[in-house]
């Protein structure tokens, strides 16, 4: 960077960065202005605002395009729908100049109005997002009722939506589940306490679709399905009114409470993959019902449910099977593939796994029939859930109902992406935490699920996970909960708030995938540090690296420099021991890549050795489909 000062002066210094390339960089200087401008027009332009956002009920922050003083800016600033009490500069220099200012208002800012702040004739909309994400907003608007969404009755149906920043909400009713249908009725919802909007629909409207039209103070209008949807039209476009609780098999009950997590043998598979092979002998290939069919290959190998039973597992972990966004449910799965880590509607089964995605009840009854069939075979069901991010925030009911609330933002008011998906859920906020707890409880109660595996659990705060565990304990203490506790992205957040294996003692009834066990048995995921089944020179020093029959990994692990890193696991049930899962290479492929000249017979022996280590270690035993 270069520094220039006007001739004869050492008081005002300008700083600028030359533009890329070899061409000269022109800069323009203005008397008594510390900025160096890259264009003449901007240097000569009147003062302007680059941003304006609400930070508390009676204050907002503005950023000016050019540095100035409070005295110079206060006469030019104006508010619509309010008036200024006083202004203070943020990080002013020795001349009292700053670019950022806090405006304190005489009255509280009405978030339902079109709030604007102007500098001269240059008016800018006030972004209420930072306030919406504040504790003050939560304290004022968080709702603790258990009746959000649709409550059906044959005589009347109640619809409730939490949308405190909306100034109008209309309910569109459709007597058809066709997504192209026009509204049959439009009902204006009534705003109540804490920004909850309510509508009562008279008569029996079972099978009708609905969505919302919301109007906000700044004039923005959105249309969305219900974030608390329990049934939806094809591709999850609209919500559907149904008697959700009574769509179930006649003999649908919970299994007896499971003994303890360390007795679990978990088998991970995908509903689509499990039965899709042309030789599976299963009719409903890639579907919920295909999971509970029994078939045979042309050579006599048993498949489907009989195969699962023969494995001797206690639990099957199904990869995401809620309604996800990347698969077009109107088309065959044959030429589409996605694991499902792209949430659309959290409380609705995925339509592509049902026999008829256009029938809102088919996916519900068939998923429950799958769970019921597995239960009757003595196999419990764990569901892979992805609450840490969504597929597309701009098309998600969360953002369309309460813009700026449900996601985490950085200091510049941009959504964070520690998940690597462009957005991270802000679980520490009251209504996000409530949503996650309500969702898990719904699946446990209405689908009789026996466990939950949380994707990138480290991005969910510990209070949320403890609340989830407490809520499940009231239903069945034998429900298993575990997830990915790696530290990702912002380590400050994950260490201080997130649910990680390094803070396991603060969530004592939640389990964690043990990458330490995985790395010692198989090796790290990229193959640069081989594990014991491949051979890494530690075979004779087995006790120190403590894979079998010891509690070393509960207490910590040896690092490569021979130092000891402590862990904080409270019990063995917090360790999910595994050598492979859906991420990365299968165990066979991993060993083959590391040992390309090894025979299949010897690879199979090494796989069996890895499986034995996992099965005989303290903790929960976890196996990836095909690993057997």
Image (spheres, rainbow, N blue to C red):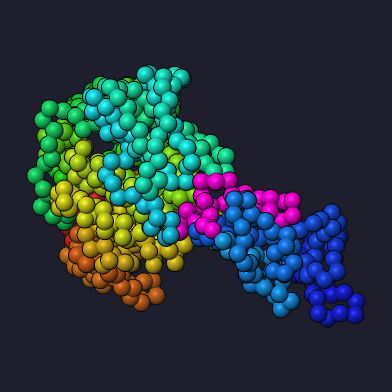
Which image quarter: residue 482? bottom left
Residue 212 in the image: state x and y as whole percent: 43, 32
Please name the residue shown 84% across and 54% down the image. Answer: 41
Q: How many marks?
A: 0
Towards the viewer: 404 or 411 = 404
Towards the viewer: 474 or 600 = 474
Residue 116 visible? The answer is: yes
> Was residue 7 drawn as part of the magenta stretch in this picture?
no
Q: Quadrant of the C terminus?
A: top left
Please name the residue shown 33% across and 67% down the image. Answer: 502
Q: Going by the image, does 260 lie left or right of 535? A: left
Which image quarter: residue 36? bottom right
Please name the residue shown 22% across and 47% down the image. Answer: 451
Residue 387 visible? The answer is: no
Q: Going by the image, does 204 lie left or right of 526? A: left
Towards the viewer: 45 or 599 = 45
Towards the viewer: 64 or 589 = 64
Residue 346 in the image: state x and y as whole percent: 34, 40
> Was residue 113 drawn as part of the magenta stretch in this picture?
yes
Residue 386 in the image: state x and y as whole percent: 36, 46
Which image quarter: residue 376? top left
Please name the residue shown 60% across and 64% down the image. Answer: 85
Q: Residue furthest right?
A: 7
Q: Is residue 380 above or below residue 213?
A: below
Q: Quadrant of the N terminus?
A: bottom right
Question: In this picture, which residue range is highlighted in magenta?
Answer: 107-134
Residue 58 in the image: state x and y as whole percent: 53, 60
Q: Is residue 414 above or below residue 299?
A: below
């Amino acid at each position: 960077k270069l520094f220039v000062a006007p001739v004869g002066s050492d008081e005002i210094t300008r700083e600028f960065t030359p533009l890329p390339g070899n061409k000269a960089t022109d800069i323009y200087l203005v008397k008594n202005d510390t900025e160096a401008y890259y264009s003449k027009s901007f240097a000569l332009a009147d003062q302007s605002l680059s941003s304006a956002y609400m930070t508390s009920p009676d204050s907002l922050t503005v950023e000016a395009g050019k540095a100035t003083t409070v005295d110079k800016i206060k006469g030019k600033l104006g508010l619509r729908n309010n008036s200024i009490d006083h202004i203070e500069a943020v990080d002013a220099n020795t001349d009292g100049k700053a670019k950022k200012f806090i405006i304190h208002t005489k009255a509280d800012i009405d978030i339902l109005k079109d709030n604007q702040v102007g500098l001269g004739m240059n008016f800018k909309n006030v972004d209420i997002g930072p306030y919406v994400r504040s504790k003050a907003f939560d304290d004022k608007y968080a709702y603790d009722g258990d009746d959000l969404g649709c409550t059906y009755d044959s005589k009347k149906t109640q619809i409730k939506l939490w949308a405190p920043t909306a100034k109008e909400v209309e309910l569109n009713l459709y007597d058809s589940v066709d997504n192209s249908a026009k509204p049959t009725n439009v009902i204006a919802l009534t705003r109540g306490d804490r920004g909850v909007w309510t509508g009562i629909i008279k008569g029996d409207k079972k099978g009708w679709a609905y969505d919302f039209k919301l109007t906000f103070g700044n004039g923005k209008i959105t249309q969305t399905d219900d974030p608390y949807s329990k049934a939806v039209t094809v591709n999850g476009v609209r919500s559907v009114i149904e008697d959700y609780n009574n769509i179930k098999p006649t003999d649908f009950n919970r299994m007896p409470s499971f003994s303890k997590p360390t007795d679990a043998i978990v088998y991970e598979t995908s509903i689509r993959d499990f039965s899709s092979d042309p030789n599976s002998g299963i009719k409903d290939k890639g579907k919920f019902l295909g999971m509970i069919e029994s078939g045979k290959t042309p050579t006599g190998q048993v498949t489907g449910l009989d195969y699962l039973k023969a494995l001797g597992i206690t639990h099957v972990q199904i990869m995401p099977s809620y309604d996800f966004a990347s698969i077009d449910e109107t088309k065959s799965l044959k030429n589409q593939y996605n694991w499902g880590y792209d949430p659309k509607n959290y409380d609705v089964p995925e339509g592509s796994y049902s026999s008829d995605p256009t029938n809102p009840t088919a996916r519900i009854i068939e998923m429950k029939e799958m769970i019921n069939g597995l239960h009757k075979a003595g196999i419990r069901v764990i569901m892979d859930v992805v609450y840490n991010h969504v597929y597309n925030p701009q098309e998600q009911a969360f953002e369309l109902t309460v813009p700026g609330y449900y996601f985490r933002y950085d200091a510049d008011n941009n959504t964070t992406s520690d998940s690597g998906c462009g957005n991270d859920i802000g679980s520490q906020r009251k209504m996000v935490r409530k949503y996650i707890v309500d969702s898990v409880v719904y699946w446990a109660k209405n689908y009789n699920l026996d466990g939950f595996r949380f994707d990138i659990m480290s991005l969910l705060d510990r209070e949320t996970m403890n609340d989830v565990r407490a809520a499940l304990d009231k239903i069945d203490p034998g429900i298993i909960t575990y997830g990915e506790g790696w530290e990702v992205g912002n380590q400050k957040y994950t260490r201080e708030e997130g649910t990680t294996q390094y803070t396991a003692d603060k969530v004592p009834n939640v389990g964690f995938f043990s990458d330490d066990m995985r790395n010692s048995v198989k090796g790290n995921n990229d193959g640069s540090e081989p594990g014991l089944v491949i051979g890494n020179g530690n075979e004779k020093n087995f006790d120190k690296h403590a894979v079998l029959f010891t509690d070393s990994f509960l207490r910590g692990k040896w690092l490569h420099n021979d130092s000891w890193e402590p862990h904080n696991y409270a019990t063995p049930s917090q360790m999910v021991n595994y050598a492979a899962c859906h991420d990365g290479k299968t165990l066979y492929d991993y060993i083959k890549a590391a040992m390309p000249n090894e025979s299949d017979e010897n690879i199979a022996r090494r796989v069996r050795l890895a499986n034995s280590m996992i099965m005989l270690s303290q903790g929960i035993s976890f196996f990836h489909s095909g690993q057997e």
